[in-house]
Image (cartoon, helix red, strand yellow):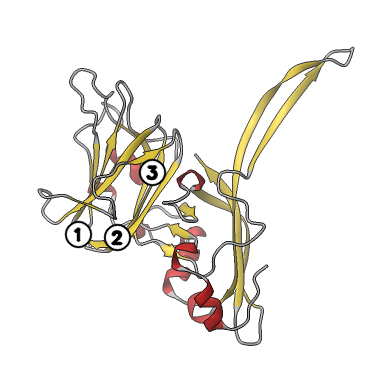
Amino acid sequence: MAIYISNALYLESAGVSNRPLIAWNSCFTLSGVSSGDTENGFSASAVWSADTYSYWQSKPAGVDGATFFPQLTFVNDNNENVDCVAFVWQGSNASFVVEYSTDEITWIPCGSGGYSYRAIKENDPVMFYFDAVNANYFRVTFNLNLGDVARVAHVKIGTALQLQRPKYVGDIPGGMNVGVEKVGSKSYAGQHLGSVLISQGESFSIVQDNNTPEFIRSSGLQNFFSHAHRLLKLSEGPVETFFYAWRPNSYPNEIQYCGEITSFEPPNNTRSNGMMSWSMKGDAFR
């Protein structure tokens, strides 16, 4: 539970890097994504769709002359500021780098570290957060091992929503709130004969306390609520799903791809000075 003394003191104690991030909108459209390294039958346009059963796939690295560095390129149609790239990765262990360009000729890496490739764990959601950039084009380059393919189910490129308060004691890290359903079997003598995994699922939980009235009523948070409830236009990308992370550059294995809200507590006044709380829970996907 958070302890609130005063708004100024509370804000001072919560560093920017300690606040959760939500990547929910995109600066590119269905026709604004392309790749010259695509395997037949796995179009780059698949990454615009929010589902995780359709995907873009590159050609196997190093096979028949295919590159070890396949790329996805995105057009920033409205020249929006971009500080976050997030995607659902369904390939093997690999690495990636994000770049931007104003002319699609000269490319500059986003964030600090230059061309330092960032590791991707097998079948993990990915979020890369960096200082905001305004450019016409963005691209993601993957570094693969021999015979591996890049496989991406969904991408969001835009401005991340930074929540007002950090996480607290009692919060479950992303990816660790996993539930399974099994059917066990035993013999007449009571011996264990094994079990069968019926289903496996992951859930997310966002809890925010002591949000200021200004933040609650800001367009960023209100638009996110509309997006999560499937009320927003598709101009911001497919509705409902989003990426949720706390310190994604420090804890890249705890990023969640979320959707299908099962519980929502709307903002409500919790203090006489107007401070408000809200929460959201639901399913996460791979």
Q: Amino acid at mark 1?
A: Ala
Q: Are marks 3 and 2 in contact (CB under 8 Å)?
A: no
Residue at the image point whose x is 29% and y is 55% from the top:
112
Quadrant into which the N terminus falls? bottom right
Q: Amino acid at mark 2?
A: Val
Q: Earlier in the sequence, mark 1 or mark 3?
A: 1
Between residue 29 and residue 214, name the one nearer to us: 214
- Secondary structure, mark 3, is strand
Q: Earlier in the sequence, mark 2 or mark 1?
A: 2
The residue wearing badge 1 is: 135
Q: What x and y, as percent, mark residue 247?
A: 46, 55
Q: Identify the mark at residue 82; answer none if there is no mark.
A: 2
- Secondary structure, mark 2, is strand
Q: Earlier in the sequence, mark 3 or mark 2?
A: 2
Q: Identify the mark at residue 81; answer none if there is no mark.
A: none
Badge 2: residue crowd in 10 Å (few <14, some 14–19, many ≥20): many
Q: Measure how far apart labels 2 and 1 are at the Cα level.
A: 8 Å
Q: Are marks 1 and 3 in contact (CB under 8 Å)?
A: no
Total tally of numbered discs in the picture: 3
- Secondary structure, mark 1, is loop
In front: label 3 or label 2: 2
Q: Measure how far apart labels 1 and 3 are at the Cα level.
A: 21 Å
In front: label 1 or label 3: 1
Quarter of the image holding residue 223? bottom left
Where 126 falls versus 11 (above or below)?
Answer: above
The residue wearing badge 3 is: 154
Q: Amino acid at mark 3?
A: His
